[in-house]
Amino acid sequence: MKTVAVIPARLASTRLPRKMLLEIAGKPLVGWVYEAARLCRALSDVIIATDSEEILKVCEAHGWNAQITSSSHRSGTERVHEISMHVTADVYLNVQGDEPLVRAEQIASLLDVMKNSSVGVGTLKTLCTDEDSNNPSAVKVVTATDGRALYFSRASIPFDRDGNKPKYFKHLGLYAYRKPELEFFVNHAESTLEKIERLEQLRFLENGISIYVGETAFDSVGVDTEEDLQRVEQVLRRR
């Protein structure tokens, strides 16, 4: 199974300007993601997909494989699709560029999901902390017994009506796609639930395309704010 990891890296960001190039413990944020992905030996290639010449030059200076993609893309998935147009693979991974704590073990767990050739879209979950169970920035997921995602939400799902204290699972922002599912995504408009929750993976579920969810013991922290940046830097310095 030829697998290519794509790291979408857009320079423009609203909450934390130029975050892809912000240094964490002496290295640009996007570099931490790239080098972590490279540690997964099951990957055939890792490509940083950017719309920024500045990011491209930084990548070239460090020897990180990067390609320029269109500035018109509205999501990282669209950027992954562009790479898929000229890079042949069985499976394409979307490893988000603002996840510097991503681990090779997480990527390996996601690739395990895709070993089933009938799976078109895969992603990951991990046990949700008490802190994140009511945090709308931490997306929750519920799954069927066979691993299919039933729903993703910023709300706490399932709702604990009778005080049974269920396990909550946090959705991690790593995705794996086969080419037909990427084609489907870019050729269909935002779905109703996707617009409401601001979660693009709901486009698949609302159109009857299954997403299978693997589980990992390793959590991650996305960098969207200055506080996130400081929290991640502390973790990386401890490592």
Image (cartoon, rainbow, N blue to C red):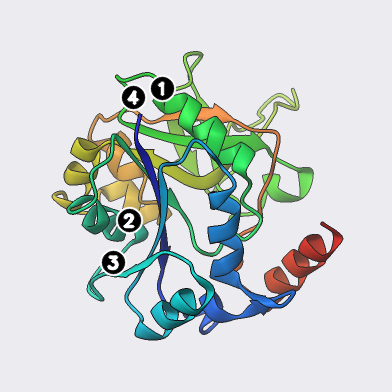
Q: Considering the numbered disc 3 on the image, is that residue within a helix, a strand or a loop?
A: loop
Q: Which residue is mark 4?
A: 119
Q: Earlier in the sequence, mark 2 or mark 1?
A: 1
Q: Which of labels 2 and 4 is toward the front?
A: 4
- When asked about the image quadrant of residue 91, the answer is top left
Estimate the spatial distance between the alpha carbons at disc 3 and disc 1, rounded to whole Å.
29 Å
**For this view, does 58 lie left or right of residue 236?**
left
User: What amino acid is at disc 2?
Assistant: Lys
Nearest the eye: 99 or 14: 99
The answer, for residue 149, to whether it is visible in the render is no
Q: Earlier in the sequence, mark 3 or mark 1?
A: 3
Q: Position of residue 18 (x, y in %)?
A: 51, 83
Image disc number at residue 74: 3
Q: Which residue is mark 2?
A: 195
Q: Position of residue 65 (x, y in %)?
A: 42, 64
Please name the residue shown 27% across and 30% down the image: 209
Q: Position of residue 89 (x, y in %)?
A: 28, 40
Q: Pointer 2 and pointer 3: residues touching (CB < 8 Å)?
A: no
Nearest the eye: 81 or 133: 81
Q: Considering the numbered disc 1 on the image, is that residue within a helix, a strand or a loop?
A: loop
Estimate the spatial distance between the alpha carbons at disc 2 and disc 3, rounded to whole Å.
13 Å
Q: Which residue is mark 1?
A: 115
